[in-house]
Image: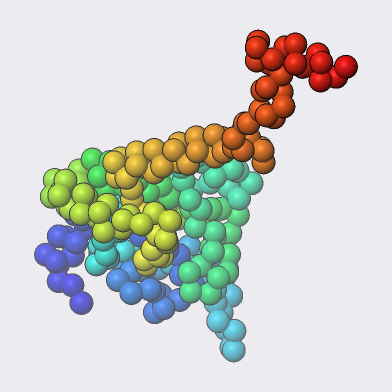
Amino acid sequence: MLNRSQEMEEQCLPIVSLVIVADKSRCPANFVPITSTHDDNSDADLWKDGFGFGIFTRSVRYLAVNRRVADTNGPLEVLTDLAVISDKEAVPSSFICLDFTVDTKERALKKKFLCARFSPRNEALDAVTNIIILGKTKRPPRGYSLAGEVDGMSICFKVSTIPENYGRLTHSQSHELDRLGNCNLSSASPAVTGLYPTVNRHSTSDLDKVGQNVIQSTNQHNINAVFRGIDRVPFELNPLFAFVLSEKNVVSFVNFFN
């Protein structure tokens, strides 16, 4: 359990993963569920169906965030934007849709979709560092932006500047990853870490070498393609015609046929 100071320090770090769960006790490792509203400390359930008696369990939905950087050499992505849209709207460009619960694979929200945009850490200066849910207040607190409303609840997020040394690859680290991960492009396979797949990184020099090999292979193929089966057989004139075409033997050639 985090104390107040640890919690405040944690909230200064960028969010790297975001999920919706149907059971707050079944969050993936390192995910922290948002169970209480920021304004009145009420239940932050995003699926208020009103049922739940006897043997029936009331359906609930909780947002859960992860700020822990995975211990991997793969590229790090951070959350940079949030939006709530109608289930009839198209997902905004460069956003992904959290349409199912991660634990039960059920629909995440009623009539709404929560969409998130992630960006590579090395390309982002700012990131979402905190998400809160408001139960009664419609206006987000100072420093927060409104993503949208879900079942009368307002989802708000805070964007902060990423610390300079947070999760950034140095030039030497990036070069080492390229060297280790892309020595053999033909046999390399994409690595999968956590909930999000990663893509192999290729240095410019490696891609140039591949391009040159492809061009050389293509040129060689084209050269070979213009030859036919007899094209490489040495040409040799019939000895009879060689004799006939000689100026000294023109008369003999005529007499030969007479």
Q: Give how far across and how far down residue 155 sits, in percent.
A: 40, 52
Q: Is residue 119 above or below residue 37?
A: above
The front one of 169 and 20 is: 169
**Going 36% across and 57% down the picture, which residue do you hit?**
184
**Going 27% across and 52% down the picture, which residue do you hit?**
178
Quadrant placement of the N terminus: bottom left
Asked whether residue 2 is in view, the answer is yes
The front one of 108 and 60 is: 108
* Image-based side of 257 in relation to 17, left or right: right
* Image-based side of 206 in relation to 252, left or right: left
Would you identify the image quadrant in which residue 242 lies? Answer: top right
Q: Give how far across and how far down residue 196 sits, in percent.
A: 41, 61
**Going 22% across and 50% down the picture, which residue do you hit?**
174
The front one of 211 and 194 is: 211
* Image-based side of 172 in relation to 109, left or right: left
Quadrant placement of the C terminus: top right
Would you identify the image quadrant in which residue 181 lies? Answer: bottom left
Instruction: Please give the count of numbered marks on the rendered protein.
Output: 0
Q: Give how far across and how far down residue 26 sits, in percent.
A: 41, 78
